[in-house]
Amino acid sequence: MIIIKSVFFVLVYILISGKILAQQYDYCIHDVSVITAEKATPLHEHQDVFLRKDKIAKISASSGVTPKNCRTVIDGTGKFLMPGLTDMHVHLPSEHIEKFMLLNLAAGVTTIRSMRGKYSHIELKKNITSGKMLGPDLYIASTYFPNKNITIDRLADSIQGFKNAGFDFVKVLAVPDSLYFEALMKAAKKAGLPVVGHAPNHVSIERVIESDYACIEHLQGLDDAFITDSNTIPALVEKMKEHNTYNCPTLDYYNVFLLQVPVAELQKRPGLDFMDKQTVAGWTKDLTEDFAKFNQGSGDTLKRKQEKRQRNMEMRYRLIKQLNDLGAKMILSPAEANDPFGVPGFCVWEEMKLFSRAGISNKDILRIATYNAADFFHESDSWGSIAEGKKANLLLLDRNPLESIENIQSQRGVFLAGKYYEPKTLEAMMKD
C-alpha cells in the first residue's frame, strides 16, 4: 500500500510538473514580423516571440501551429513587432505626472530621458522601477547648469553629490567661461557621470566634442558650423565618432516654434483627444496670437521674415541628413512634450515624420528611435532591440513602419517589462 501511494504521488508530481513546464512562457506573439532596424536585414517574417517575466525568452520561426506552452497567445499574423520608442529630451511636468506617463505608453514610448531634473524625480524613478507607478523607464538629468551656488571650487563635490543621489547624467545649459567648462568636465569624468546639453557659447564646438560631451542637444554649435561652412561637418563627425558624441536634433520643437505648421494642421495631431479641452484651447489661443504678431506688416519685410524661418528649418533638415549620411550618432526627441500641441508621447511620432522629411530612411529612423537610445546609455546588450534575453519593452503594429514611417501610428498594443497593454486599457486608466 505504501509503495502504491508513493507511485501515485510521483505520477501526480510528474503531471503537475509537466503542466507547469508546458506553461513556461507568459506570452507568445505568434506568427509576427519582427523589425530589427539595427541590423542589415531589418525584417524577419513569421516569427514566434516568447516572453517570460520582463524578458524576451525565445524567438523561433513559426510553424503555423499555435503554441501551447504559454499563458497568453497574441495573434501576430500580418502584424509587426518592434522595440518600444524612446523620447530622449523630456521636461517632466510638475503635475498630472501619472497621466503624462500613461500618454507616453499609449503612444508606444517605453523609455524617456528627463532633461530638467529635480531631486523629487529620484523618488519618481524608484516608484516606476518598483512598479508603484506605471510608466516608461526613466533616466534623469541633474539640476542644470548654470547654478550660481556651485562655484568652480565646488564642482567636484556637487557633481559627486548628483551621482550619489541617483541622477544619471549632468545637464548643461550654459557656463560662465571655458575654465568653468573644463573644470565641470573633469569633475563629471571623475564621478562617472556623462555630460549632455547645449553647446556652451564660450567653448568651440570642436572642444565640446573633444571633451567627451555625451550628447549635443538641438544641434547647437553644429548649426553655426554648418551655416558658416558646411564643409567643416565631415571633420566634426569624425571627432564625434572618436569621442562617441551623440546628437539630439529636436526638429519638431523648432518646426512649431518657428511657426512652420498652421494652427489648423496642429489641431489635427494624434493624441489631442486625450488632452483636456482647456489645455488645447490655451495652445490654440497662444499660437494664433503668435502667428498674428509675426505676420504683422506686409510686402518684402514680411516675406523676408517668413523666408528666414523657412531657411532655418531647411538648414536643420539638410544638417541632420548630412550627419546621418556621414555616420554620426543620433537619438530622437521632439523636445516638445507639454509645449503647445506637444502631446506627451504622441509628439514623438511628429519628430519621426520630420526625420523622414529630411530624407532619412525609415530603417534609420526606427534605429535612431530605439536601438540608439540604448546604445547611448551603454545598455544595448539589455534593451533597445528584439533579441533573446533583452527586456520586453515592445510595440505591436498593424502596419509596417519600414514601408511608411506614418505606420508607427497603427499601434495594436505595447509591452512594458513583459506586460501587455492595449490602447483601450491605457485610455481607461487615463480617465480614472
Image: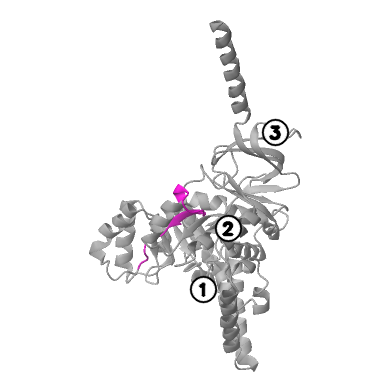
Percent from the top left, x then y, of residue 383?
53, 45
Label 3 to label 2: alpha-carbon separation: 31 Å
Q: Quadrant of residue 305?
A: bottom right
List the residue tagged with mark 3: 67
Quarter of the image with the N terminus in it: top right
Of 59 and 68, the residue lying toward us: 68
Give the mark nearer the N terminus: 2 vs 1.
1
Of 152 and 128, the residue lying toward us: 128
Give the mark nearer the N terminus: 3 vs 2.
3
Residue at the outermost front position? 1
* Residues at discs 3 and 1 in contact (Cβ within 8 Å): no
Residue appearing at x 62%, y 21% in the figure: 15
Callout 1 amino acid = Thr
Residue appearing at x 68%, y 37% in the figure: 48
Mark 3 or mark 2, whichever is nearer to me: 2
Callout 2 amino acid = Met
What's the magenta region? 129-145
User: Secondary structure under badge 1?
Assistant: helix
Label 2 to label 1: alpha-carbon separation: 50 Å
List the residue tagged with mark 1: 228
* Residues at discs 3 and 2 in contact (Cβ within 8 Å): no
List the residue tagged with mark 2: 429
Percent from the top left, x then y, of residue 192?
35, 51
Tell me if residue 142 is in the magenta stretch.
Answer: yes
Quarter of the image with the C terminus in it: bottom right
Q: Residues within 10 Å of mark 1 (few under 14, many from 20)?
A: few
* Residues at discs 2 and 1 in contact (Cβ within 8 Å): no
Percent from the top left, x then y, of residue 274?
61, 66
In the rendered image, the vertical position of residue 9 relative to residue 3, given as above or below: below
Label 3 to label 1: alpha-carbon separation: 60 Å
